[in-house]
Image: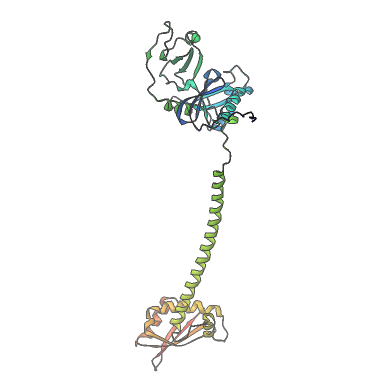
Amino acid sequence: MTHGVRSPEPPSPHAAGLWTLAGDRLIIVDADGPATILVPTERVRLLAVDLPLPNRARRLAALPFAIEDQVAEPIDVLHLALGGKLDPLEAPARYLVGAVRDETMADWVRLAESQGLGDAAMVPDALLLPRPGQGWTVEIREGRALVLAADGTGFALPAPLLQAAWEAAGCPRLYHLGEPVGAEMPVQATSPDPRTLQARAAIAKAELDLRQGAYAVRRPRSSGALRRLGWIVALGALAHVAIAGADALMLSIIAKRRAAETRELVAIAAPGVDLSGDFQARVTDLLPSATGAPDRFVPLLARLSAALSPMAGSLSTQAIRFEGNVLTIDCAASAPDMATRIAAALRGANIKGQATASPAGTIRITASAL
């Protein structure tokens, strides 16, 4: 039996955890928390930069000009990352800035992606130190010194060079973590950092994440995003259908209401008329064939019926005619003063007309559409 050559296993994806970059390897430090990679501060220049501009876009545009005198490399070979405010109360326009060579940043991102950490933030490891009120916080581990200054900037260097850097900076006060410093460097205080590693990483990430600009995390359009887009389109279409359906339903309701109101008006004006079957034809049949504008009949009848509605139970319509612009209704009344009451109702409704009682006990109501 011949065995083929086994291909190497692909890197397993890591969605979370705190990692440290050592050379060309990523080493897990803490498996909990959001994905974050601690990069060596030796490769990152941490600067305090004043950017008194109103928005982030303008600050980013001005950043290369603001730091060109503070870095040794040409600006066009550097990746610049804008961090948070260093002193919001005393210096609200002062920001933390990280400068790292483009090729270095590109190598870090490729390594992270090859290890399934393409979404991880990248934070200079000196930012995990507690920031002192004055002077420096210093941590020495395995021959390496990390320094975080009171102004929020920091650096890293080999431990044997720490004393020379300290003296060049004017011998600032020292707050010490980790391995002891040299005897020639007096330490103000030595105490462990009480914060958890996750808390320290979260604060450092908020202060400065190097994954910006060309190296920002690129999140592809996932099927979830497409599903959300599909839902938005579907909901929009459903909303249009619902609105159209609601409009049609409302128009139907309005039409039925108008028909019911017209039936009530005709019933008041001509209570003995059979309105079954074709309602429109029945109402049309009530209109006389004489001259006159038919479109004035219904509005006048509506006004007259509304005025007489309080007395509808005491009136019995016998005949209705519309000639010229005059509507005439003959009705029987059950009360002797009904003609007077009808005349008052016509005046109250601003209807030009009159009510005349006949000796036979009927009342003729005349109303003008003009």
Up the image or down, 127 lies above or below 365; here it is above
Q: Which residue in the rendered view is the most extreme toward the bottom? A: 360
* Picture residue at 51% right of the left edge, 31% below the top: 14
- Between 285 and 162, the one lying in front of the other is 162
Up the image or down, 218 lies above or below 236; here it is above
Q: Which residue in the rendered view is the most extreme toward the front? A: 1
Which image quarter: residue 188? top left
Which image quarter: residue 58? top right
Up the image or down, 236 lies above or below 190; here it is below
Residue 162 x, y percent position in the rendering: 48, 10
Up the image or down, 189 lies above or below 98; here it is above
Total marks drawn?
A: 0
Residue 77 x, y percent position in the rendering: 63, 22
Residue 358 x, y percent position in the rendering: 41, 92
* Picture residue at 53% right of the left edge, 80% below the top: 280
- Between 212 and 307, the one lying in front of the other is 212
Residue 250 x, y percent position in the rendering: 50, 66
Query: In the picture, which quadrant includes the N terminus?
Result: top right
Which image quarter: residue 295? bottom right
* Picture residue at 48% right of the left edge, 79% below the top: 301
Q: Is residue 351 visible?
A: no
| Figure colour scheme | rainbow
Q: Is residue 367 visible?
A: yes
